[in-house]
Amino acid sequence: MSVPNQNFEVLIVDDDEMTVFLHEVYVKDNDFHPAPKSFYNGKDAVDYFNTYFNVAKHYCILLDINMPILDGWEVMDEIEEKGMDKNVSVIILTSSINTADRLKARKYNMVIDYVEKPLSTQHLEKIKLQDKIKDYF
């Protein structure tokens, strides 16, 4: 298991407990991050950012779109409104096959990938090569 980069955090945000568990396993087993932080709704993730955001860190969020309380779009809107988006990379992880969602995701500069569930080793290896986060691996 790798030692966590102190300047890189991974957050998993999904309302389905089994999905969160599986994403945690993939993230750890594929040396993406040894200790991801998990949230079961968007509001808890936003609250975490509002409390612990550090401009010296980069955050990678594996984000579901359709969730209660705050959905994925609202999470990204909150991050943008607070000016935190330069330090955030988002991988949309969704069961949505709606083309409109894919197009909407492109409007957010922080979105670096759009993946239909389930997450896989191949997806994580591809994500590690993204310009915004490749230096953390």
Image (cartoon, rainbow, N blue to C red):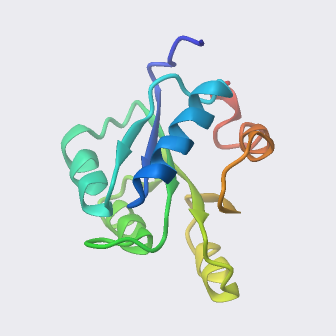
Q: Which is nearer the eye, 89 or 39?
A: 39
Residue at 61% x, 71% y is: 95
Q: Residue at x 66, y 56 (%)?
A: 118
Rendered location of residue 33, percent (x, y): 55, 27
Counting from the top left corner in percent of width and height, residue 129 is at 78, 39
To which quarter of the image does residue 38 belong?
Answer: top left
Q: Position of residue 16 (x, y in %)?
A: 42, 59
From the viewer's side, name the closer residue of 99 and 24.
24
Counting every numbered tag in the picture gives 0
Q: Quadrant of the N terminus?
A: top right
Taking the spot 31% from the left edge, 52% from the top edge, the residue there is 45
From the viewer's perspective, is 96 left or right of 65? right
Q: Nearer the viewer, residue 126 or 133?
A: 126
Write down the quadrant of residue 29 in the picture. top right
* Up-down relation of residue 1 to residue 42 (above or below): above
* Vertical order, 120 against 93 (above or below): above
Q: Name which residue lies at 67% across and 78% down.
A: 102
Left or right, 34 with reference to 43: right
Q: Image quadrant for the C terminus?
A: top right
Q: Nearer the viewer, residue 104 or 135?
A: 104
- Asked if residue 38 is positioned above or below residue 41 in the image, the reply reads above
In the visual, does 71 lie left or right of 134? left
